[in-house]
Amino acid sequence: MSEKRLRRRTPVRYKHLRDDLNKLTESVGLELDLSESFLERGHFEGQDLILVDRVPVGIHLDSGDGMVWFPTLRGIVTWQPERSWAAVDHGAIPFLMNGADCMGAGVHMADPSLEAGDMVWVRDQEHGKPLAIGQALVSGSEMVAMTKGKAIQTLHWVGDELWELDT
């Protein structure tokens, strides 16, 4: 069992999180009303988190162009967004579950609006289940066309410490 835990967990009012929540939901094209939810801020392993009803659903990540809010995998599972995704074949799944970067050869479909540097969530091509979150190293159309090399730098995956975080 890991000794890592959520720190500086603080309940906050909706009005204090409104701007961050808007950035979080805009990043994947969602419109959500979280004004009636129990909202908290937290800190885990150097990353700021937003918790909704005690579940870490948003993470503050460095995109290279500055800090951005993006859903955690639990946020992806909860909200099922239709933007900023890449779908991988069955062969890539075991590697992603160990935290490996996503190779271009495994990507079969991707959101065409993705640009290099954007945050992206990786899903299973067959079932659509989220597997990882990372930063796109190339555009969505380039990912699909790639036959070798890295397409996505993995930052958070199913089975990592953030996923296993017991809130």
Image (spheres, rainbow, N blue to C red):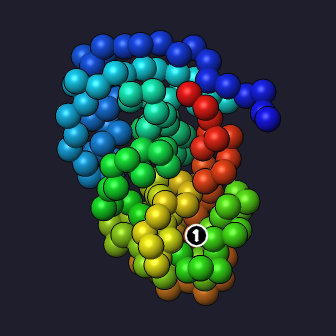
Point out residue 80 in the picture as x, y percentages from the top left corner: 34, 55
- Residue at image position (46%, 20%) is 41
Res. 101 visible in picture = no
User: Within 10 angstroms of label 1, few (less than 14), some, or many (20 or more) residues?
Assistant: many
Q: Nearer the viewer, residue 162 or 117?
A: 162
Q: Is residue 58 left or right of residue 62?
A: left
- Residue at image position (62%, 28%) is 44
Tell me: residue 149, above or below residue 60.
below
- Residue at image position (68%, 40%) is 161
Mark 1, residue position: 151
Point out residue 47 in the picture as x, y percentages from the top left corner: 58, 30
Point out residue 109 in the picture as x, y percentages from the top left corner: 43, 78
- Residue at image position (71%, 68%) is 95
Work out which quarter of the rendered image holds the C terminus and state it. top right
Q: Is residue 164 left or right of residue 78?
A: right
Res. 42 visible in picture = yes
Disc 1 residue type (three-letter)? Ala
Q: Nearer the viewer, residue 11 or 144?
A: 11
Q: Is residue 137 left or right of residue 46?
A: left
Tell me: residue 17, above or below residue 32.
above
Point out residue 128 in the picture as x, y percentages from the top left corner: 43, 69
